[in-house]
Each structure stands twice: as structure tokens, then as C-alpha cells.
Image (cartoon, helix red, strand yellow):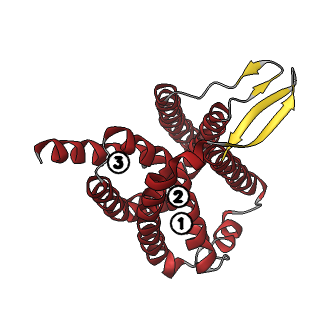
Amino acid sequence: MIENIFTLLMLILLQAVLGFDNLLYISLESKNAPQEKQAYVRKIGILLAIVLRIVLLFVLLKVIDLFQNPVIKLPFEGVAEGQFNVHSLIVLAGGIFIIYTAMKEIWHMVAIPEIDTDVQHRGKSSMNKVIAMIVIMNIVFSFDSILSAMALTDVFWVMATAIIIGGLLMIWLSDRVANFLERNRMYEVLGLFILFIVGVMLLTEGGHLAHLKLFDNAIIPMSKTTFYFVIGILVITDIVQGRYQKKLIAEQDAQLEKENKET
């Protein structure tokens, strides 16, 4: 029992660390729902995802070999080689979708003529569509955490409890992250670029799982260390840029005020 409790604590910590990118996606995706329904969408989406994660855990315990057996092979020797299994296909599909979502939102931010237009654009998607996207992407993100949990223990109740507690923590944090982004909309761009890097990481992970080779070069997965290092650089750059921009604006205002006094 002591060993199971220690493993449970380790799995909860693992869920929290691996859930960061998922939480960011949920916060950004929920903005597509009507304003008054966004908190509800986040909670329902995560609750449904918790149930489906437990179902997925049960299925993986029973048919793990089916997820690892190759289903598609690329025979183009020297150009494109690989053996795709269900796991790699799901991870690759998730990576492609996240990159598409991030780039679409970034392009929208660049293309809008006014901020008010962006605000009106938000909330146009149906509530059910947003919930479905949160649930689907939650499952994609959950594969790594579930497989990592299975490597630590084979006790179902320990893994299921960690999933439930991790999901409840996400519900508790989701409103706080969403409210922070709402109050500080300048960080939405940072969040979208982090999401883009998450998509790249999933693509490299999926390619590695499929033993994919392009022109005889094997796809190597992005390590978590590299991922968090890049995120750290992005955050520091954004903070420095923000402070420098405020300084420039203050200097411009002071210069304008000085010119007005002189005239």
C-alpha cells in the first residue's frame, strides 16, 4: 500500500507536468465558445475527458499490443520509410491539428484590421463543437501520460485515481489560466507560439514512434528538456520585449508632451 501511495503521488506530479500544454490548449480553444459559456465548456470538456481517459486506460491495458503493431508501412526506400501504428498515427494527427490551429489563430491576429473585430470573431463556434475539440485533444495529450503511468505501475486504481486528481486540478487551473489570458491579451501570441512548439514536439514524437526516415534521416523526438528550454526562452523574450516597448512608449509620450509645451 505504501508503494502504491508513493506511485500515486508520482503519477499526480507527472499528470501536472504533462498537462501544461493541454491546459494551454483548453484555455485558448474555449475562447471560441460564447463568452458566458466558456467556463462551463472548460469544465464539461475536462470532465468528459477524464471519463474517456479512464476508458482509454482500461482499453490500453487490455489491447496494448494492437496499438503498437504496424498498420501502415512506407516502402519508399531512401525517400520515406516508416511503420505507423495506431499510437503514432494519433500523435501525428494531434500534432498536425495543433500546428494548424496555432497558425490559423496567429494569422487571424495579424490579418484583423481592428481589435474589436477580433473580439467579435470570438464566440462564433457552437458550444458542442468546442467541447468536442477539448475532449479529442485531451485524449491525444493523454497518451504519453497514460503510457508513462503504465510503465510505473500495473495497478488500475492507482492510475485511475491519478487521472481523476489530475483532471480536477486542470478544472481548478483552467479558469485561472483563461482569466489571465483574458486580462493580458498580449500573452495570447506567446501562448499560440508555445502551442505551435507543442505541435512540433508531437510531430517528432509521432515520427519517432513510426520509425520514420526521410531521405535516410531518422526523425528524432524533441526532448522535454529542449521543449521547456525553448518555452523559457520565449517567455523571457516576451517579458523583455514588453518592458522595452513600455519604455519606448513612455519616452515617446514624454517627447510629445515636451513638444506640446514648447508650442
Q: Which residue is mark 1?
A: 135
Q: Which residue is mark 3?
A: 16
Q: Amino acid at mark 3?
A: Ala
Distance from the alpha carbon under mark 1 to that under mark 3: 17 Å
140 to the left or right of 113 = left
227 to the left or right of 77 = left
Q: Which residue is mark 2?
A: 139
Q: Secondary structure at mark 1?
A: helix
Furthest toward the left, the residue is 2
Measured as percent of width and height from the top left, residue 252 is found at: 59, 39
Crowding near the residue tagged with mark 1, few <14, some 14–19, many ≥20 C-alpha atoms within 10 Å: many
Residue 259 in sight: no
Residue at image position (67%, 77%) is 124
Q: Amino acid at mark 2?
A: Ile
Q: Amino acid at mark 1?
A: Val
Pointers 2 and 1 in contact (C-beta within 8 Å): yes
Residue at image position (52%, 58%) is 139
Measured as percent of width and height from the top left, residue 225 is found at: 46, 26
Q: Is residue 93 above or below residue 119?
A: above
Question: Of 251 and 83, which appears nearest the observer?
Answer: 83
7 to the left or right of 119 = left
